[in-house]
Image (cartoon, rainbow, N blue to C red):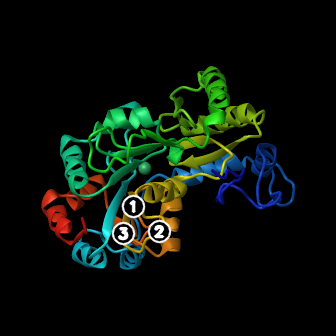
Amino acid sequence: MAIAVAISESTLFPPAVSPINGYFTTNMLLKKLETNGNGARINALLDSMRASSPTRRPSDNEDQKSWTLHHPSALSMFEEIMSASKGKQIVVFLDYDGTLSPIVEDPDRAFMTTEMREAVRNVAKFLPTAIVSGRCRAKVYDFVRLSELYYAGSHGMDIKGPSKGHKYRKGNQTVLCQPARKFLPMIDRVYKTLMEKIKYVPGAKVENNKFCLSVHYRCVEEKRWGELGDEVKLVIQDYPQLRLSQGRKVLEILPTIKWDKGNALEFLLESLGYAESNDVFPVYIGDDRTDEDAFKVLRKRGQGLGILVSKAPKETNASYSLQEPTEASSYAVPTRFSRVEQVVPT
Ligand SMILES: [Mg+2]
C-alpha cells in the first residue's frame, strides 16, 4: 500500500512556509502557525481554533436560501436521488458524531438513539453500509453495536469488515486495513504526554483514537484556548511525523500519512469489488471538515453523492444537505430502502 507524507490543505495555515514537494513537516507547520507573511508572531493556532469553533448564529435568510438552492435537502430530493441510482449498487457511508449522534458536551456520551440504530440496521439489511469516523474503531462500534456493518475508525486508518455470517462480509478477512500501524507506539507516547500536560486546563480532554488523538476543548473556557493550543503545539513539535488538524472544538493529532476518509471510502469500494465499476452509487453522509475528503472523492469519481449534515450554510463538496441527525434517520426509513432493493442488482 502506497504511503506518502502529506499535510492536507487547510484554512489553519497562512502561506508563510513553503512545503517541500507539497508536504510539510511538523516543525514547518508550527512555524507557519506562529508567523504571518511579515514574520510577525501571531497566535494563528488560537485564531484558527476560534474560526473553526464559531458560536452558532442564525444565518442570514438570503445566504440560507442560496445555499439550500445549491445543496438541496436530501429529504426533498429522495425520489431524484433514487432514480439517479437506478440499476446501480448503492453503498452507504455514514459518519458518526453529528451525523448519527448529536454533538454533546462529553464525547464519551455521544450516544445514538434506538430509532437511529434501527434505521441503520434496516439500511444495512439491503445495502452494504460503513461507519466512517475519527473515533477509535472499538469505541464507535460500542456506540453503534451493529456487527453487520463495515467500520472505518481513526479517520479511516483502521478498517474492519462485518463479522462472520453477515451478507456483505468478504471471505474470512476481519481487519482489512491499518495503514498507520507503525505509528501506534508514537501515538501512545504522545497520548500519555498530553494527558499529563493538559490536566491543568480545566475541561480539556484527550481522546485516544488508537491511530490518532483528539484534544477536545468544548468544555474549556475560551480564555484558556490559547494556553491549551500552546501545550499541544509544544508536545507535537518533538514529533515531525505527526500533524495537527482541527474540527469544531477539537484539535486532531494524526500521523503524516496520506490517508483520510476519502481513501477509506475508495478502499471500501475496492474491497466490495467496485474499484473501477460504473455500477456503483456511493452515498456518503457526514457533517465535518474531515468528511469533505470523502465528498471530494465522490466528485472526482463522478459517482454517487455526498450529503452534508448542517443547519448553517457551509462551503462543501457535498451535493445535498440535511439539517440534523434526526433527518439522516428519517432518510433511512426501511420503507424507502425496501423500495431501493427492487432497483439494486443482486
Ligand atoms: Mg462528524
Position in image of residue 285 (x %, y %) = 37, 59
Camera-near label (2 vs 3) is: 3
Q: In the displayed structure, does residue 35 sit left or right of residue 333? A: right
Position in image of residue 25 (x %, y %) = 78, 47
- Quadrant hosting residue 38: bottom right
Whether label 1 touches label 2, CB < 8 Å? yes
Local crowd size for mark 3, using a 10 Å CA cut-off: few (<14), some (14–19), many (≥20): many
Q: Residue furthest left?
A: 335
Q: Secondary structure at mark 2?
A: helix
What's the residue type where badge 3 is placed?
A: Phe
Note whether residue 232 is visible: yes
Name the residue carrying label 3.
281
Of 47 and 279, the residue lying toward us: 279
Residue drawn at point x = 67 percent, y = 50 percent: 3
Camera-near label (3 vs 1) is: 3
Q: In the displayed structure, does residue 109 sit left or right of residue 36? A: left
Q: Which mark is residue 284?
A: 1
Of 87 and 7, the residue lying toward us: 87
**Measured along the vertical axis of the image, is residue 16 above or below residue 143?**
below
Residue drawn at point x = 68 percent, y = 29 percent: 186
Q: Residue furthest front?
A: 171
> Sequence order check: which comes first, mark 1 or mark 2?
1
Q: Which mark is residue 298?
A: 2
Q: Which mark is residue 184?
A: none
